[in-house]
Image (cartoon, coloured by chain):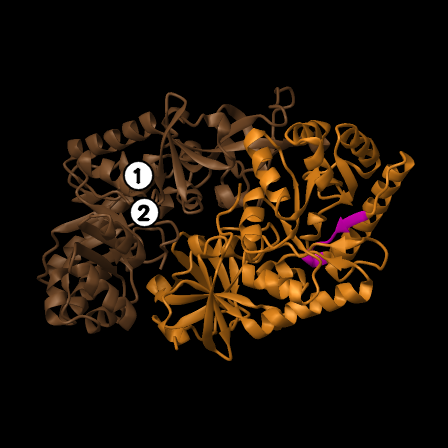
Chain colours: A orange, B brown
């Protein structure tokens, strides 16, 4: 048995008890609300974790790219929504057709041009096998049409030969302190308005899909048919600082070694090539230390994380190890080939990050 | 032959002409200065590019981690400096011993504890085969001892049985607008003071190693014996904005597709999982567009880059492709499995990112 102390650092540790708790909690919450859970697997990119989510009741997986879908289909998953306004050229159309032969597939559109390109790459049979959802902007202002324009786009997509089943949104502006409830309300309003816009044009709208980890617990019953949180499986420093979770829900950390005390610094070997370089404007640093809540990563380079401590805090010795909570766990996981699965402080298994790098 | 238009996006393109120009230019500059060039291969992690650097006259490779060294030694490279204050526990000592059997190896130390741990993991023969350099802080204030303390640390390391050959520094504070010449001067002073501190204690200091891409051209003759720039092979948006290079030296771009015009945005599929999330406080955005110098990436998420344009600028259509210059090319490369090598606008080869993810 490998001991934690023998692992080469930096590496990603998953606390299996906490992972299971997070998966069960979100699944239970969705069940109580009567909302289908379609977790976003870009967070973990792991077949094993996706299997745990389905076993706990998830209806299927959300993914971000065609290559993620190819990896998960290769692992036997059969119900996938690529929640992205894909631009489908001839090679991508070939890949979508291959996916349609092996899974139930939905994709997003947010423009008439995108819908026409998608339809042009598929024959009539393929178009009937593919579910299309119109992306709606609920206030994040990234992709997606305004809710009141969803009907027109759905009509254009239908006219192009696509089979529109409804609407989806990503309320990414929930990633801001104190915004959660307001954003969940905007999300609900946007989905309702978009669904009405489809129905006004005589189009059905059986799917209203929303959800992000910050808003998931604020989703009201009846406001959506499915939700797609991702980060909840692991948690991260962003979720801690947004108040979405407490430290006892952090299921993934980066094990790091203190390599230097030069100049009074505490420098860890977990740099941006292990943690990712994410830092939201409101974040207190480049990551947190799970066992030192007052410490902050004040600067980050590829192989160095400089930790700032309160003036009188005891600091870990050179050579000692600490557990770092990445700011944005999705990017940290995409940097790792393997997740080290632990229970009771012992290494139990290693799970491959099946879809690491599958970002096209 | 694969055409650029057939590539799945996002993907990393390398312009081979520019790569060769950058490699030759830095090699020539080092030769003129009489300084050995030991390029930092963490930037490209590519055996093919390292081979081009050696063929152009580089003395050996700089690397950041033991696992990078293992990957490059596995590809036949035999002269390696791990420019990092390694913490060497028993498993890492085993790995260093294996490297010493197959290459000429140098490593950094910046603490007496680190030096003692390194020495304790090796037997007397191994310690004589390993070159040790003392890391000195030239003003970046990350790792490294103050120059005047380098003599004491070199003495402690020697006392522990290590074979100290000199000093090194990384002048990372050169990554700030207008700082280049001043930082190059500080670097030269720090290396001179550190070398004097060793000699004051009767220790030789044949190696004085410095250099970063921003300071490389400001290195004065005689100020160091070798330099270790990395980013110069590709260039990136940080180097553009620091004024280190012009756009005609950008040898690596991320090919991206415009996927959405929603809400007046121009959204690309090159998100932080392709570009990395780096953004220095002085950076104008999350990356640049090579063919649209006035455009900026104003926000970045995992699979979305939102581009901001001057008010009257024509914008690329949905479905069209653009070339994005990542802010920090080292992190972008570490996200890719393959570099697509182009010449005259055509795909010529694909080179693996040999040491991608080799960060322990």
Q: Is residue A355 above or below residue B152?
A: above
Q: Earlier in the sequence, mark 1 or mark 2?
A: 2
Is B70 placed left or right of B197 in the picture? Answer: right
- Residue under the image location 60 percent in, 43 percent down: A99
Residue A211 lies in magenta, yes or no? yes
Residue A199 visible (yes or no): yes
- Provide residue B332's location: percent of width, then percent of height: 44, 43
Tell me the SS state at disc 1: helix
Q: Nearer the viewer, residue B184 or A82?
A: A82
Q: Nearer the viewer, residue B255 or B300?
A: B255
Q: Is residue A183 above or below residue B98?
A: above
* CA gap, disc 1 and disc 2: 8 Å
Is B326 placed left or right of A198 in the picture? Answer: left
Residue A197 lies in magenta, yes or no? no
- Residue under the image location 11 percent in, 70 percent down: B124
Query: Which residue is at the far bottom?
Result: A344
- Provide residue B181's location: percent of width, then percent of height: 31, 37
Task: Judge the density around disc 1: few (<14), some (14-19), many (≥20) Cα neighbours within 10 Å.
Answer: many
Q: Quadrant of the N terminus of chain B?
A: top left
Judging from the image, mark 1 belongs to the subunit labelled B
Tell me the SS state at disc 2: loop
Q: What residue would you read off at disc 2?
A: B171
When asked about the image quadrant of residue B15, the answer is: top left
Q: What residue would you read off at disc 1?
A: B215
When asked about the image quadrant of residue A65, the answer is: top right
Is B313 placed left or right of A10 in the picture? Answer: right
Q: Which segment did they paint magenta?
A: A207-214
């Amino acid at each position: 048995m490998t001991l934690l102390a023998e692992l080469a650092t930096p590496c990603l540790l998953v606390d299996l008890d906490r992972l299971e708790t997070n998966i069960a909690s979100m699944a239970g919450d969705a069940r109580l609300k009567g909302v289908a859970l379609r977790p976003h697997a870009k967070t973990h990119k792991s077949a094993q974790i996706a299997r745990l989510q389905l076993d706990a009741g998830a209806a299927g997986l959300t993914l971000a790219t065609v290559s993620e879908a190819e990896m998960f289909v290769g692992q036997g998953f059969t119900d996938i929504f690529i929640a992205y306004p894909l631009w489908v050229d001839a090679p991508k159309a070939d890949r979508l057709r291959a996916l349609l032969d092996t899974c139930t597939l939905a994709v997003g559109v947010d423009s008439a041009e995108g819908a026409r390109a998608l339809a042009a790459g598929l024959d009539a049979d393929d178009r009937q096998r593919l579910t299309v959802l119109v992306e709606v902007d609920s206030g994040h202002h990234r992709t997606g049409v305004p809710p009141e324009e969803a009907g027109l786009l759905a009509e254009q997509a239908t006219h192009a030969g696509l089979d529109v089943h409804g609407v989806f949104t990503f309320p990414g502006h929930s990633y801001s302190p104190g915004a959660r409830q307001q954003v969940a309300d905007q999300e609900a309003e946007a989905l309702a308005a978009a669904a009405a816009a489809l129905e006004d044009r005589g189009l059905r709208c059986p799917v209203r899909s929303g959800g992000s980890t910050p808003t998931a617990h604020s989703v009201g019953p009846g406001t959506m048919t499915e939700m797609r949180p991702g980060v909840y499986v692991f948690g991260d420093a962003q979720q801690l600082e947004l108040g979405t979770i407490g430290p006892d829900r952090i299921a993934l950390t980066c094990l790091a070694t203190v390599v230097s005390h030069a100049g009074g610094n505490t420098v860890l070997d977990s740099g941006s090539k292990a943690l990712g370089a994410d830092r939201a404007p409101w974040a207190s640093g480049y990551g947190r230390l799970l066992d030192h809540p007052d410490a902050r990563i004040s600067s980050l380079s590829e192989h160095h994380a400089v930790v700032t401590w309160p003036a009188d805090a005891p600091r870990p010795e050179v050579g000692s190890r600490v557990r770092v909570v990445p700011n944005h766990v999705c990017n940290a996981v995409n940097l790792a080939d393997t997740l080290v699965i632990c229970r009771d402080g012992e290494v139990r298994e290693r799970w491959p990050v099946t879809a690491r790098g599958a970002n096209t």
